[in-house]
Image (spheres, coloured by chain):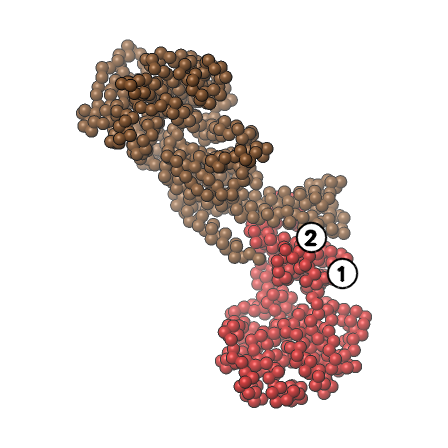
Chain colours: A red, B brown
Amino acid sequence: MEGKRSNTQPLTLLRKIKGFTGSIVEDLARGRAPTIYIDRFKNYCTDTSGNCSCSSDGSTGREAISLKRECHARRIDVLLRVLLIIQQLLQESRHGSKRDIYYMHPTVFKEPSVVDRAINDICILLQCSRHNLNVVSVGNGLVMGWLRYVESGRKIDCISNPNTAYPIPVHVEEVDDIISVAQYVLVVEKESVFHRLANDQFGKRNRCIVITGRGYPDVPTRRFLRLLVDKLHLPVYCLVDCDPYGFDILTTYKFGSLQMAYDAKFLRVCEIQWLGVFIQDCDNYSIPQQCLLPLTAEDKRKVEAMLLRCYLQREVPKWRFELELLLHKGVKFEIEALSVHSLTFLSHEYLPSKIQSGGYI
Amino acid sequence: MEVSSVQMLYTHVIDFLYSKTLIFCAVQRCRLADDLCRLSVKLTSFSRFGRSLVRISVSDTGVGSKLEEYQYLKYRNDAVLTNQWDGMISLATTSISDSEIHNLNLNLKESDSAGRLIKLPSTAKNGDKFSGTEVSVSISKSLDDLLAEVTCFLQKMILVKIPASSFLSLICFIIRIKCNYLLYRPLSYICLFNQDPYLSWLIVCFFFQKVVMELLVGGNDPLGSQIESRILAIEGSSAYSPVESIKCLEVGFKDYVRNRHTVFSIGETLKVGTGVANSSGSSQGNSQVVEAVVIISEMSEQFPSSCIREQDMKMEVLYFKDFVPCSIAQSAVDALTSINWKSYGLALRSIADHDGCIMLEWENLPQYFHVHIAIHCYHRQVKQLVAQNSLPDRNLARKAVKCALDDLKENNHRVLLSTRALKICDCAPDLAKTLARLILSSNDLNFQEECCSLLGLQSRRVNMDNVGNCIRDKIVSVIGLNDRNSQKHKDAPSFLFEDDYLQKEDFMDEEYQEDEEAYNSLDL
């Protein structure tokens, strides 16, 4: 939750950066090999007994990076370069994207994921979230519905036209004065479904807020959803494709991603409930065989790997059962398959009936 | 020379080796003697039945010779050998307690032991108390070639100095030899010493603490008639009298490298490491010792690279057995190949064997660098009989060379860093530059001052380059320290028994290789 982290003000972070730099310089000056210790976090493991400590949000170990290995030296080089950029951003109160950072030393960073890792390492070292470092990603998410808020002093009034898509604010910490008369929040995996609902005037018929992360949700989308849930205390339903990727996106909303496990408690939305589409929906809603696609070998591998995640057994066994069913049936289908009956079937029939009847898990 | 070397003597038709064998035995007799000894090598050319022959005489004032010393020598019927040597060895020897000098002829061609040994009339000592031996063979060989070989051999031999029990200091004899025979021989090693074309000086001297050696060269007349030698100087310097054998080897080897590479302007840029390994001892309590000296020389970069020949990039490994240069033992070659050179930043391209002389060639050595290695294997307790000397232990030789490499690395920062450390060093400039920018781009001036103070930089000299260079040097220094420490930890597990430790070393290198791969797999 915003403001839950302490000591994340720019001046505090700059002081931490100086402390970190100073300790390396001191080690070198004294002829000692500097060693950087980075706590390791994970939000799940493969212990299906559920007896693990992944739910504790604490670190699960500590990694020592030193100048004893070439790969470590290169990693420290990347980390320091990113830290230098962050120091400049914080000192000048400017923001930069991961992409901006990547293109400052593309030959050293080699690929954007290397910058990602360095930023995550720095967040862990400085005990802050990514946005505290003034590193932001380009906003990817969309929102519409019965919602009004102020972003950086500018009023965003979705209520005036609840079927119009608005970009989810990038600087979520600058969102204020949230007002809503919605009864629930609906998160949809795909932008196409989001626009289907907008086109069907779903917002006019249903007092809700609809959000999409357009695939795997980025940090601002998850932070914004988390902010809405914390402020408005509304139930949250999630609609994803009935395939391994849809399920993975669903778990990202609920449990956070493994890469940012250190920040999971500030990004996850534990309250989220799975609305569909389920594998048995193809029978319940008479989806023809032509709309069903067989699971590929890669799909099966991904499902089998996800079934091992400890949090499924421990916290959402029904979800796990659905996943097993998916693997057992060996087929998958998209949300859009519901349009086989009519274009508006999803917005007029499926969603209202599911929400009213409690057809979510 | 050990039995295998004696056998090798006959497998290589290099007649010079005969004299090496004779010198080896003479040195061991000198080591057994209590006093300062003299060892003379005389090469005398003469003609017989129209053939040019050279008589090689090796005489010493050590303890008397034993006949058993020669029992292992066997003559191999070989056409080339038969043409060069008649198999006869003349021997004159006496012990301190003998009243006469025994004269013998040994005919190695004779397989029957009774016919093999021919006793000649003895020579009376007239009550004098002395001991010594003179062994001679005559071979068909060019004196020029033989002299070049003997000189090269002796130049190596002076590297190892036989420690004396007393405080005998360096004694340098310069034997002035007036030898007309040599006037017409453009032998550089002779002319080096004297520019007078009418009087060649052959300096032969040398020895050090226990044994003084001379090389005499004579012409066609009866032995000695054209050799006029006299001692020109005897210098003594108590300051230059290393007692430890390894120190002697170190000093001698440094001189050897300097003299050998004066053309490359090596100067004072020698980096030296020494190592000693002892065996736990045999049942007779005679422990084996292997000493190793590794020298890295750096040629002046002003020396034109075009003048560096391919053979200059190959370096001979000098090998000594019981204080005598010797063909390298296979176990020592195995020891060299088993060393994980990567941990010293080296990659061995090849080990070439040229008639027992081992040449190392490196893959990645900078053009101006050379690695020189000398290995000396000996027994603390001198054994007169060649057959009693065993082969050097492979693990001992390996341990000694590794100790020398580690010693060199310890005392010379940035030298012999492992391949892994060198790769890490490649990151140092970038790391240093970023750290310098983190410090100097901070808007906290106090922080900048603190960091510069830690780095020992004066505030008025602070700029990006100075801070970066200072940090880079410290990073490289730390990497070197890490490298040396990791080597120590790798090499010094707490084995209860030294033998266990030696046996495990081989496996440790394999582990190192695996580690390297493991590190690579963790790459970004």
- Which of these two is toward me, B279 or A200? A200
For label 2, the crowd category at 10 Å Cα-Cα, with few meaning under 14, some 14 to 19 and many 20 or more, is few
Q: Position of residue A225 (x, y in %)?
A: 69, 74
Q: Which residue is mark 1?
A: A94
Under tag 2, what secondary structure? helix
Residue drawn at (45%, 48%), measured in percent from left and top? B509
Mark 1: amino acid: Arg
Quadrant including the C terminus of chain B: bottom right
Residue A290, by quadrant, is bottom right
Q: Establish whether labels 1 and 2 are both on one chain.
A: yes
In the rendering, which numbered label is found on residue A19? 2
B8 is higher (above) or lower (below) than B193? below
B301 is higher (above) or lower (below) than B243? below
B199 is higher (above) or lower (below) than A81? above
Residue drawn at (41%, 36%), measured in percent from left and top? B358
Instruction: Give the side of residue A216 with respect to residue A10, left or right.
Output: left
Instruction: Give the side of residue B427 with respect to residue A326, left or right.
Output: right
Q: Position of residue A141 (x, y in %)?
A: 69, 73
Instruction: Give the side of residue A278 with respect to residue B354, left or right.
Output: right
